[in-house]
Image: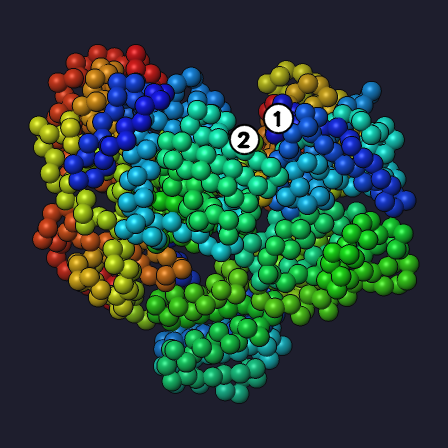
Amino acid sequence: MSVNKSKPVYTPLQADTSGRFHLMLGLAEGAAALHRVIDELQAVAPDSLGRTRVLLSNTAEPFQDLGLAAVHVFEDTTALLADFHATLERSLMGTRLYVAGPEHFIGRTLQIALAFNLNKDEIRTEHCGTHARRVHCVHCRATTEDVRTNIVRCSGCCRWLAVRDHYSRRLAAYMGVMADAEAAGELPPVQEVYP
Amino acid sequence: MNDAQTLAVQVAAIEQVTPLIKHFTLKSVDGGPLPAFSGGSHIIVVMRGNLRTHRNPYSLLSAPHRLDAYEIGVRRMEESRGGSHFMHDQVKVGTRLEIAHPVNLFGLDKIARKHLLIAGGIGITPFLAQIEDLRGTSVPYELHYAVRSAEHAAFLPRLREREGERVHLYYDSEDQAIDFAGLLSEQPLGTHVYVCGPAGLIKRVVDTAHAYGWPGSHIHWEQFSAPPVGDAFDVFLSRTNITVHVPHDRSLLESIEGAGVEVPYLCRGGVCGFCQTAVLELDGELLHNDHFLSDAEKARAKSIMPCVSRARCKSLVLDL
Amino acid sequence: MSAVFKTDETFRDDFTFRNSPEAIRRFPLPFPEDRYMYSVNMEPHGPGPAGSVTQFAFDVDEHYVAECRERALVLAEDGLRFQALPHMMSSQWDCLELIMESFARDYPSHFSLNKHGNEWHWINRPLNVDQKFVFGDASTLPLQPLDYIGRQAQGDFVVMDQREGDLWIEAGMVTAQADWSLDFDIGMTFKEWHGPVPLAHEMNVFDRALKYLLNLRLGQPVRRLNWTMTVHPRLDTSPENYPHWGRDRSSVTAQNAGDLVHLRVELQGLWRLPRSNAILFGIRCYLISVRELATIPKWARRVHRVLAGLHPALVEYKGLARYRDAVVEWLAPYDDGSPTSSGTSPE
């Protein structure tokens, strides 16, 4: 079965020393990935640490005493994303964005980054933690969060939805399509496939 | 593109706007509208001289929504292979020319949050059309225009009148220079920079932008330079079964066209890759002058861009 | 092309859609050989033979009025079947100009376009439209330009912006699609949009197509054919409405396959647009029942063989799994094994 080319591909974060400013966002286990990048920057481009800003949530990972421009820990994702948006409004060309965390977090940060014309050359993402998906129901347009199974009941219209690999960056969600439209009630067994 | 798809135009007006630059207004021979175009587009003007045919690209500087005429600006080049001299010396009001449909290899990024336009000399031409497109939007932009002196600032009255504060002029004669570092270090996210003019200006902007962390996708440049000259050489076209001689001051592409063989082309400047031709045999070396092939591809010497590249060789066979 | 429009045809409910013998003969069969696999298969979109679907830039046939009515019904139920991102306005005007000029030039008895500078006067006789407006001024049209003209043309329209060395799906009028959602896909790149297509990516079909399209020139459009099958002559086989049409796939038998199952062919045209430098992707949909197809002996044999030998991944992706065998069984009596000439002509 070939891979859907819209499905995001994540790679372990590496420092992008072609950038001048580094803006890093980490949720939960993502913080450790950011720490790795900062260590890398410290080794190859220590001057850039003073132009590196870190926004975190759900973590106790220590980042002090590294000469970073700022480290902020937010009580929840909403507060983090609000600060992220405000930061982008003040940011300059030459900024590189690093995001590490579960996919739903990456998706929502990229929605914000999109509005500032940041493109793939300026963004690096690493997936950490749960593979649970956000699913967009193509019938009623509701989003069902935290989906770990191959089929799921839509939070909006209650239909059983097959969770596809077709992904929209604009919606930060995978496509969900009625699973038994061709033969009512004919559903595959529910399996946890996105742990 | 090939010559079969050209439009027939007639020169309706010629104005000497600076000591070196002439402004041509072209109208359709049949009196009908010309195709609309997007700012940054260029046309290839086919000039059939007595001895040779020139095909030169010129940016359209007219307003893109203006369909009754196209306007181009031609700088008289000191070391010309004839194209700009032909335009300046042979072309008169009433002269008929063939032009290709506009092609845009220097388009504005439609989702940019700001446009930074940098022009040197004749490089102002594509921006004149682009600022017409920008006027209809609410996206902020700046134009920085460097010239030798006020006398050489083409289209200055038009710019001043329509753009006012958004145009920043720099006169070499008064030691005014663009502060590339200052300019490129302070732009908000989502800015795109566009530069058109001499090679040196382009290099300064591109290098400085990279130094300040701009990714390549936000840096746009266009350069219309004549194909480099070089030692004469011969080339054999395997499918047409003829040998073509390439004189020192004619490009490989022009020489092949002169022999009656058509090669698809778009920009004629080594940027778009459209004329890429397979090299079947080579005894010597290829002189790659293009910006399309990767270093690895250039080293493999299996492809060449005949519009700007040449060879120094005992034999060269192309798949044409 | 017949000048008589079938105004009462339906593409839903009672499905009264039928092709006249003339429409059958001009049908764009997408199978030049007895087996089918993807290819880039683009060719210049130049004038085809008189009376053929490619004679003109945009084909208007006997189903024109009925299809426009069907489109209006889809849009009334779901307004998001037309969308355009804000920066795509100049491309919408480019599309309106292209379609209006083509229709007026190619079907002067049905359409007229008169211009005095930017003051345009558009007349569409089959749909009873008489509209004066200022080209470039959206306030002078009752709808956005692509919405306005899209409702007066057959087939779907997708507009792709070109930037950063890629193509981005950022505007569209999509009511007759083969199972893809504009609302979900808008904003995607060319390859992301085609993400779900199996095998083709491994064959580099989309890499090559993208490279070709990035160099598409003004005045030199291209075209290609694509195909799938649909149960009933239903144009709106959108994912959005899958709960309504999905069950049709389970209703096909070897006895009713000839009447229920339709070959659905997309004549895809691609045009470079002048002011926006974007690309218009026109997806013109033609439907023909298997029974209508079988009235042409060569086509009956050809389609029988293509379907019988179709790659399993394509059977799956094109949604044919539940009824492919029934169609093959229905066509079998028409295939005596005799050779078929290559090419798609009826003889």
Subunit under mark 2: C
The secondary element bearing badge 1 is classed as helix
Q: Residues within 10 Å of mark 1 (few under 14, many from 20)?
A: few
What residue sits 50% from the left and 52% below the top?
C139
Q: Viewed as shown, does residue C132 lie left or right of B312?
A: left
Could you give the CA–CA distance between mark 1 and mark 2, rounded to whole angstroms?
9 Å
Using the image, determine if residue B186 lies above or below residue C158: below
Task: Tell which of B309 and A26 is nearer to you.
Answer: A26
Please indicate, yes or no, whether residue A14 appears anywhere in the rendered image.
Answer: no
Whether residues under marks 1 and 2 lie with C-beta atoms below 8 angstroms apart, the answer is: yes
How did the renderer colour the structure?
Answer: rainbow
Residue at the image point whose x is 38% and y is 28% from the top: C60
Looking at the rendered structure, the secondary structure element under dot 2 is: loop
Q: Is residue B30 left or right of residue A133?
A: right
Residue A75 placement, left or right of B66? left
Q: Identify which residue is drawn at 70% across, 50% down.
A: B127
Disc number placed over residue A104 in the picture, else none: none
Tally of marks: 2
Residue B54 lies left or right of residue B21; in this view the side is: left
Q: Residues within 10 Å of mark 2 (few under 14, many from 20)?
A: some
Write down the chain letter for disc 1: B
Q: Which mark is residue B5?
A: 1
Amino acid carrying label 2: it is Gln
Report the disc number at residue C220: 2
- Give coordinates of residue A83: x percent, y percent: 47, 79
Label 1 in the same subunit as label 2: no
Split into 4 quadrants, where in the image is the C terminus of chain C? top left
Q: Quadrant of the N terminus of chain C?
A: top left
- Which amino acid, mark 1? Gln
